[in-house]
Image (cartoon, helix red, strand yellow):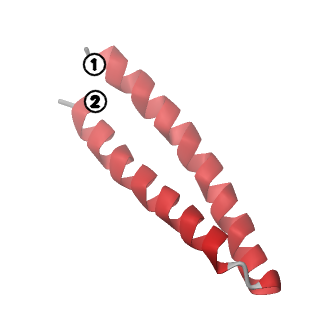
């Protein structure tokens, strides 16, 4: 079962990297074009993925 959580953690880590890039992009868009809704969406996705990263890390090292 540990190998499954390692795979899930790896996939979540890759998604977290993509969400980080999206967060930086949306922050720049917010500053230039005042598109705050996209920034809020990116921030929400980033926070959710950080939370799931913590949960999956705990399950992986159980």
What's the residue at 34%, 16% (across, down)? 3
SS of the residue under disc 2? helix
Q: Quarter of the image holding residue 38?
A: bottom right
Q: Quarter of the image holding residue 28?
A: bottom right
Q: Locate residue 16 relative to residue 7 in the image: left or right.
A: right
Q: Position of residue 22 (x, y in %)?
A: 68, 58
What's the residue at 35%, 46% (across, down)? 52
Q: Locate residue 28 relative to residue 49 in the image: left or right.
A: right
Q: Determine which of the numbered discs, if any, sits on residue 2 in the image.
A: 1
Q: Position of residue 4 (x, y in %)?
A: 35, 17
Q: Locate residue 59 relative to residue 38 in the image: left or right.
A: left
Q: Locate residue 54 relative to residue 35 in the image: left or right.
A: left
- Nearest the viewer among 46 and 40 is 40
What's the residue at 28%, 30% (across, down)? 60
Q: In whole angstroms, how far apart are the C-alphas of marks 2 and 1?
A: 6 Å
Pointer 2 with pointer 1, Cβ within 8 A: yes
Q: Position of residue 56 (x, y in %)?
A: 31, 37
Total marks placed: 2
Q: Quarter of the image for the C terminus: give it.
A: top left
Q: Determine which of the numbered discs, if any, sits on residue 60 in the image.
A: 2
Q: Quarter of the image holding residue 57?
A: top left
Q: Quarter of the image for the N terminus: give it.
A: top left
SS of the residue under disc 1? helix
**Mark 2: few, some, or many residues within 10 Å (few <14, many ≥20)?**
some
Q: Earlier in the sequence, mark 2 or mark 1?
A: 1
In this view, 26 is above or below 10: below
What's the residue at 44%, 50% (across, down)? 49
In this view, 40 is above or below 16: below
Residue at the far left: name it. 62
């Amino acid at each position: 079962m540990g190998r499954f959580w390692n795979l899930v953690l790896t996939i979540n880590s890759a998604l977290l990297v993509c969400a980080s890039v999206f967060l930086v992009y949306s922050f720049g868009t917010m500053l230039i074009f005042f598109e705050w809704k996209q920034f809020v969406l990116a921030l929400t996705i980033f926070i959710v993925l950080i939370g799931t990263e913590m949960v999956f890390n705990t399950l992986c090292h159980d």
